[in-house]
Each structure stands twice: as C-alpha cells, then as structure tokens.
Image (tube, helix red, strand yellow):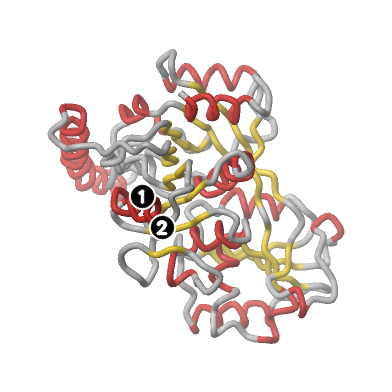
Amino acid sequence: MSARNVMSKMILLPCSKIYGAVTYMRNKFFDWGILKQHEFDVPVVVVGNLAVGGTGKTPHVEFILSQLRYSFHIAVLSRGYKRHTKGFVMASDKSTPRDVGDEAYQIYQKFNGEVVVAVCEERVAGINELLRLDPNINLILLDDAFQHRYVKPKASILITEYNRPVFEDSMLPYGRLRESIRGLNRADMVVVTKCPDTIKQLDFRIYSKHLELYPFQELFFSKYAYNNPVPLFPDRVKAFPYLDWLLETDTVLAVAGIGNPRPFVRYLKSFRAKVKVNVFPDHHSYTRKDIELLLNRFNTMRGERKYIITTEKDAVRLICNPYFPHELKPYIFYLPVEVEFINPAGPTAFVDALRKLIRQ
C-alpha cells in the first residue's frame, strides 16, 4: 500500500466509523418506532441501493414499469436529484431536466406520459399529493429511496452491482456504502446487476453465499442489453451508425456523465471502431465550456466516419442544452439500455415474485 493510500485510510476510515454509527442508530430509531414510518393504502415499492452511484436503478425501474404498466395505474416518485426546482413537481410535456431531474425526465419521455412521474424531496408529502391529484393510482414506485424509511413499503428492491460487491465495500467516505451491509436485511428482493455474459451457475452460488440472505429474501441476477444507437436529433441525421458496421478507420467519441461509465465504454470498445472517451461527473449539467470541449474534440478526431455516442441519461440533458451546436446534431446518438434477467429460475421469476409481494 502506497504512502498516499495509507494516509487516506488513516483520515477517512475514522470518519467512516462515525458515519456508520450515525446511520446504525438512525435505523435503530426506525426499528424501535422512535422515528415513525407512514403506511399507505396504495402499495409502495421501493427501489434503491446501499452504495452510491451507478448501480443501475433507473433501468430497473423502467423494466418494472414496462412489465406492470398494463396491470396497474403506476406513479413514479423520486427526489429529482440536481433539479432546479423545490417541493412537489409533476412531470408534464412541458417539463425539462431542470424541472424534474434527468432520471424522472427520462422515464416520463420513455413512457410517453403513460406513467405518472413526479418529484419531491419529502416522499410522504409527495405520495399524499400524488394520491390527491390522481386518486386512481394503485401502485407507487419510489426511485432511490431505500434509505428513506419514513415510508413503509409493501416491497423493497435492493440493487447492487456485480463488479462492485457490497460485501467487499466500506462505509462512506472511505468506501461507497450509504449504510452498513446489515441494510440488506430490509430488502425483500436483491438484484445483482450488470452481470457479465460469461456468468456461470457457480457464480450464482458464490454470490448468494457471500450475501447471506434470509430464506424470505429472493435473489436475482440481471445484465444490460444495449440496443442500436438512436439519434438525438433524428431530423438532422442521414445515416445511422450501426456499431457492428463500423470499421477500424472509423472513430467514436464516447461521452458519459453517469455514476459508472465503465460498462458503457467497454461495450463500445468491443467493436472495431476506435473509441475516444470523455467522462463527466454523474448527473452532470453540461456548460457552454463542456460543449465547446466536445466540439473541439470531435473536430480534431481522425476517422473516415466520426460519431458521438452518449448514454441515455446524458441524452436527456444534451438534447435540451441551449449551447449544443447545430453542426454536431447529425453526428450524436445515444445508446438505449434494457435490463435482462438471467436467473436460473427463468426470466419471468423477478416479475412473478414482485407481483406476489404487491398483492399480499
């Protein structure tokens, strides 16, 4: 271990111990009833994680919506991270990422307004307002709310990443955990995400052993499936860059402002085209300077054919960006991502188990 790492551990580890003690006592206050949980007549499903950044919550929320939207009148409620508004805001056709945050905006756009989407810092107040405005709602998804214990959920879904196991992590700020791994005990369903295509039955058993779940808890495994690139500005595009058609003489500029861009970049690099990478912080709001940087990077890239490919989450921020130049619009695309469950019990096991929990 280097001197720098030793110094970092000496400074951050004590802070992690203090933070861990605080979160432990907070959870105990809820367990003992000192801090009150609110229960609603409408079933509430919580989707969240133990670690910060990039576990894949939003694609899994979208998967749940795609499977249940014809059986329930669903509302999605999140805090609207990095939005420029306060309080309760319902997404509408006039909303922008600045109004509701990029994730809520992405969900609203993807489902064409068929799903009610709202944001509110206080989830209890947000649920009450949703039910007041639309009494027909009969299922609520709370996005990124595993630690928001003021709402008592009907089902809790914990998302954790295959390549960054929670059982090998530490508390913030030394590690990435928002709370102790004991928080796993509150989950009804645990989903290990971003699994490799090469995962084997033995890997399922090893992961299950390390998580040490209770018999009532169900464990699922999922992976990302990337689709063909989609233009941000379809009316400006003449040719679509199917990735497997690109050659070694072509160049792709990968642009990502998400929690964990590595799977996205790794996927692009699995094709023949040369890949240049520009990474920004998670939920990044692109400034004029950022856009000028991308324009300059694109113009100086060498390649017979050149494209910019970004993530679905970044696309919703870029398409509304007033600084985005017209000359780049024919060349920028985003990569849609879908969730595929790869459980030994079969691809429908997750949805079947969730339906059962909701109807209990």
The CA distance from mark 1 to mark 2 is 10 Å
Dot 2 lies on which element?
A: helix
Q: x, y percentage for residue 62?
A: 58, 47
Q: Residue 133 — which label?
A: 2
Location of residue 197 in the rendering, given as x and y in whole percent from the top left corner: 69, 34
**Quadrant position of residue 324:** bottom right
Q: In this view, does 64 lie to the left or right of 174?
A: right
Q: In the picture, which quadrant includes the C terminus?
A: top left
Classify 66 as above or below 355.
below
Where is mark 1, residue-wise?
127
Q: How dense is the environment of label 1, judged by Cα within 10 Å: few (below 14), some, or many (20 and up)? A: many
Residue 245 coordinates in the image, percent (x, y): 87, 59
Between discs 1 and 2, the one toward the N terminus: 1
Report the mark closest to the observer, 1 or 2. 2
Task: Quadrant for the N terminus, please.
Answer: top left
The foreground one among 6 and 333 is: 333
Task: Specify the quadrant of the image occupied by residue 201.
Answer: top right
Residue 292 position within the rendered picture, expressed as x and y whole percent measured from the top left: 56, 84
Q: Give the secondary structure at mark 1.
A: helix
Residue at 68 percent across and 50 percent down: it is 267
Type of amino acid at the residue the image marks with label 2: Leu
Q: In this view, does 296 lie above or below 275?
A: below
Query: Is residue 306 toward the left or the right of residue 315 in the image?
Result: right
Q: In which quarter of the image is residue 9?
A: top left
- Position of 301 relative to 198 (above/below): below
Report the amino acid beneath label 1: Ile
> Which residue shows up at 43% across the image and 70% down it?
99
Q: Residue extending furthest top?
A: 215
Q: In the rendered structure, find residue 9 and report the number of the disc placed on it.
A: none
82 vs 232, left or right, is left
